[in-house]
Image (cartoon, grey):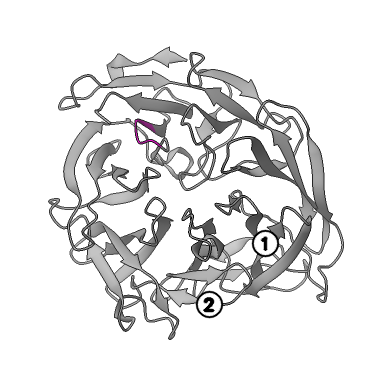
């Protein structure tokens, strides 16, 4: 680690402390995508990765591995995986176990293996390997999404993947749900439009809501027979849904798809609540906003025009909103977001979320300019520790991608 007071910007919050967590000069390191469940619940340890970028890693890279960052031990970085192809980590809700996959897949073949290991590095074991077609189908997963998601009761884990045979263009994508106790798996939904699903289990402790998964649907997409996406989305853009983890109860969120507002592609739950956030964009005037909402019964793909949709523009009091990525603390009281690149290198802001679902974001506070190039391989992707005391971001300001931490506000 390296303390970086030089990264404070004019206008930064007084008392801010900025730390560069990774420092190798010839190997890029990165935080995992900001929606990932990679923290222990006490906010003392979390997972990041070496030889990686903000959107994942190369499954054939022998330099890539996941590291535990121990915030109480001077931000010590402790390797927790060493296998080639390790991907899609999730820390169990009680903080004792890391789940991850080994990707040895190819379209129509290979294997996808779910493993777990104690966060102390002990008890590593294989839970399940998929190397044949799934039950009652001729489908096999490949190109797994670089994030998995675990239910708040710790009993189920989900990941999305490609299900093409390597010969057919525009083959389906889908969502796998693993029963962690029975070591079994089920494909709960699949189709061409699920190429960038971003699955996220609800963090609610309610017995019913713990089965809900937030997912993204990319209408008008296309991909080649190997599953390489040629067109991510078309027409009126993506829409966002909630589905139960048995494949039932598809619901809609009131965002985008009206020809004016478009979902950018990042969304997340607000803490443990049933409220969710998305980032949207409009072209005229150019604007990138943060909108909250609640899911309602599925009636189609109407987005903003979904009947009965409850939505709230959190960024409406911010002049010229230009927000992209964000995350909340577990209580759903704080939000961290990046803005830019219109101001050069982007900006980080901290705000407070109200329990009033009609109120805007409150106490918006500028933290710093991360000085990122804002290229896709250097997205800032900020997120918070579960207790909201600490923020994390990426930057390539040193000339190579590194992972950073910022703290110093009142909790």
Asked if residue 138 is positioned above or below residue 338 in the image, the reply reads below
Q: How far across and how far down the image is residue 53, in percent?
A: 54, 38
Question: Which element is circle 1 on?
Answer: strand
Where residue 34 appears, as percent x and y from the top left, is: 45, 44
- Where, by quadrant of the figure, is residue 237 drawn? bottom left
- The residue nearer to you, when weighing 361 against 402, is 361
Q: Residue furthest front?
A: 207
Q: Which residues are magenta?
A: 387-391
Instruction: Note whether 87 is above or below 408 in the view shown.
Output: below
- Would you say 349 lies left or right of 38 here? left
Position of the C terminus by quadrant:
top left
Specify which label sits upstream in the sequence, 2 or 1: 1
Instruction: Please name whichever residue, 399 or 289, is drawn nearer the observer in this view of the structure.
Output: 289
The answer to whether residue 25 shows anywhere in this view is: no
158 horizontally vs 290: left or right: right
Q: Position of residue 357 (x, y in %)?
A: 23, 62
Q: Main secondary structure of the magenta part?
A: loop
Tell me, yes or no, whether the highlighted magenta stretch contains residue 212. no
Q: Position of residue 283 (x, y in %)?
A: 25, 65
- Circle 2 residue: 249
Nearest to the observer: residue 258 or residue 276: 276
Q: Residues within 10 Å of mark 1 (few under 14, many from 20)?
A: many
Pick whichever, 377 or 258, lies toward us: 258
Report, in whole angstroms, how far the alpha carbon at label 2 lies from the one at label 1. Answer: 15 Å
The crowd level at tag 2 (other Cα within 10 Å; few <14, some 14-19, many 20+) is: some
Q: Is residue 7 visible?
A: yes
The residue pinned by badge 1 equals 177
Residue found at x 62% / y 41%: 57
Secondary structure beneath disc 2? loop
Please tell me whether residue 389 belongs to the stretch shown in magenta.
Answer: yes
């Amino acid at each position: 680690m390296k303390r970086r007071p030089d990264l404070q910007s004019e206008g930064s919050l007084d008392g801010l402390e900025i730390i560069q967590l990774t420092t190798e000069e010839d190997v890029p390191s990165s935080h995992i995508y900001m929606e990932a469940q990679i923290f222990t619940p006490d906010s003392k340890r979390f997972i990041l990765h070496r030889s990686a970028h903000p959107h994942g890693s190369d499954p054939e890279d022998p330099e890539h591995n996941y590291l535990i960052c121990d915030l109480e031990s001077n931000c010590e970085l402790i390797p927790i995986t060493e296998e080639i192809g390790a991907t899609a980590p999730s820390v169990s809700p009680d903080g004792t176990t890391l789940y991850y996959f080994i990707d040895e897949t190819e379209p129509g073949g290979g294997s996808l293996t779910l493993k777990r290991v104690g966060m102390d590095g002990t008890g590593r074991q294989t839970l399940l390997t998929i190397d044949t077609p799934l039950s009652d189908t001729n489908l096999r997963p490949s190109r797994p999404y670089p994030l998995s998601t675990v239910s708040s009761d710790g009993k189920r884990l989900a990941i999305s993947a490609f299900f093409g045979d390597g010969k057919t263009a525009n083959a389906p994508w889908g969502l796998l749900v693993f029963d962690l106790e029975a070591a079994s798996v089920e494909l709960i939904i699949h189709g061409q439009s699920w190429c960038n699903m971003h699955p996220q289990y609800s963090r609610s402790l309610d017995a019913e809501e713990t089965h809900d998964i937030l997912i993204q649907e990319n209408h008008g997409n296309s991909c080649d027979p190997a599953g390489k996406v040629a067109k991510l989305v078309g027409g009126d853009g993506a829409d966002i849904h909630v589905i139960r983890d048995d494949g039932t109860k598809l619901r809609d969120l009131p965002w985008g798809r009206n020809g004016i507002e478009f979902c950018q592609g990042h969304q997340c739950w607000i803490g443990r609540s049933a409220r969710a956030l998305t980032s949207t964009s409009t072209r005229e005037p150019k604007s990138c906003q943060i909108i909250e909402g609640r899911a309602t019964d599925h009636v189609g793909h109407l987005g903003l025009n979904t009947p009965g949709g409850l939505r709230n523009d959190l960024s409406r009091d911010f002049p010229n909103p230009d927000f992209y990525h964000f995350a909340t603390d577990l209580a759903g009281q704080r939000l961290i977001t990046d803005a830019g690149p219109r101001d050069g290198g982007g900006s980080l802001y901290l705000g407070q979320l109200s329990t009033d679902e009609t109120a805007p974001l409150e106490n918006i506070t500028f933290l710093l300019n991360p000085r990122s190039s804002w290229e896709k391989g250097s997205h800032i992707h900020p997120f918070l520790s579960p207790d909201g005391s600490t923020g994390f971001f990426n930057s390539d300001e040193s000339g190579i991608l590194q992972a950073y931490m910022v703290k110093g506000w009142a909790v």
